[in-house]
Image (tube, grey):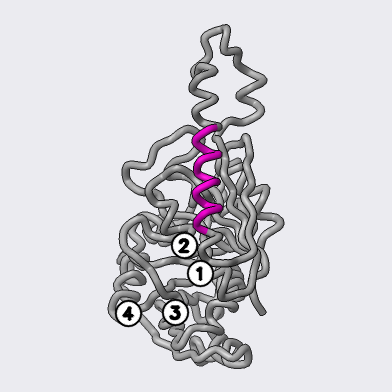
Amino acid sequence: MSYKTILVHVDQSPLAPARIELAARLTRTQEAHLIGAGLTGITMAYYRNRSVADGGPLSQRELDQLKQGTQQALERFEAQARGFDISHEARYSDDEAGTGLALQARYADLIVLSQAAPETSGFGSGPQLPEMLALHGGRPLLIVPYAGTFPRLDRHALIAWDGSRAATRALTDALPLLQRSARVTVAVFNSDRHNSLHGGEPGADIALYLTRHGVNVEVMRQTTVPGDDVGGALLSLAADIGADLLVMGAYGHQRWREILLGGVTRHVLRSMTLPVLMSH
C-alpha cells in the first residue's frame, strides 16, 4: 500500500519551502506523483459580485499582483520539485484556498499543508484552512508545524487510538507511513471510560490489525484526570517518546449547519510540535 498522488499547498508564505520539501521527500519515498496547487484566493463569486470600476475591495492592480504572486510561487515549487527528481506538476487556480484544495483533494491520496502561523494573513487563506480541510477535504491531511524542521517521518509514529470512526480512518489512511516507521506506538487514553469501544484488552485488537499489515507496534495505556486536556497530554506523550509523526482522527460536533472541531483536535492544530496526519 502506498500513496500515488500527493497534493501540496503552494503559496507565497515563508512556510512553503519546508512544506514542499517534506511533500517531495514523501513523494520520492512512495514513488508517487506530486501536485503543487497554487491558488490566488479569488473566487468566481468575487468576480461576479464586484466591479473594479465601481470601487470594489481590490483594484485591478491588486488582482494582478495576486495572480502574479501565485505564478511565482508555482515557479519556485517547480524548481524545488525538480531538485528531487520526482514526477510532479504545478496547478494554478483562481479560487479560494480551502474550496480549491478541497476540490483537488478528491483526486489525491494525501494533502500536505502547514499549520497556521500566528501571524497568518492573506487574501483567501488564514488560520481556518487546516480546520476546513480536516472536516471537508475528504482526504487525510499531513500538517507540518510552522516552527521547527522535520527531516524524518520514519523513526517513531504515535497513534491516538480511541476506537472511534475518525481514529480508524486516520490509522488506515496512515498505513503507507506506518509501514515504513521503525517504531509505532498506539496510545489508548482513558480506556476504562469507553469499555464498549476497546474490549477486554484495550489496544490489543488494533495492534493485531497493524501487525498483520507489517507494522512494528506497541501499546501504551494512558489515564488523564476528568477535565484534563487530552490534546495536551497527547502532545506531551509525543515529546516524551520522541515521536516524529502523530496520527489521529479529526473530531467534529454538528451544530445546526456547522461542523465544529472538537477540543482535542483544536488543541493539537493550535499547539502541534510534530507533523500530524489527521483524517475525519
| Residues under numbered marks 2 and 3 in contact, where contact means CB atoms less than 8 Å apart | no
Q: Which residue is disc 4 drawn over?
A: 242
Determine whether the residue tagged by mark 3 lies in a helix, strand or loop.
strand
Determine whether the residue tagged by mark 2 lies in a helix, strand or loop.
helix
Specify which label sits upstream in the sequence, 3 or 1: 1
Q: Pick out the residue farthest to the right.
A: 107
Q: Which residue is disc 2 drawn over?
A: 21
The prevailing secondary structure element of the residues shown in magenta is helix
Determine whether the residue tagged by mark 4 lies in a helix, strand or loop.
loop
Q: Relative to residue 63, is residue 50 depicted above or below?
A: above
Mark-to-mark CA distance, 3 and 1: 17 Å
Amino acid carrying label 1: it is Arg
Amino acid carrying label 4: it is Gly
Specify which label sits upstream in the sequence, 3 or 4: 3
What range is drawn magenta here? 68-80
Q: Which residue is disc 1 drawn over?
A: 25
| Residues under numbered marks 1 and 4 in contact, where contact means CB atoms less than 8 Å apart | no
Q: Residue at x 55, y 35 (%)?
A: 41
Mark-to-mark CA distance, 2 and 4: 22 Å
Asked whether 180 or 251 is in front, the reply is 180
- Label at residue 157: 3
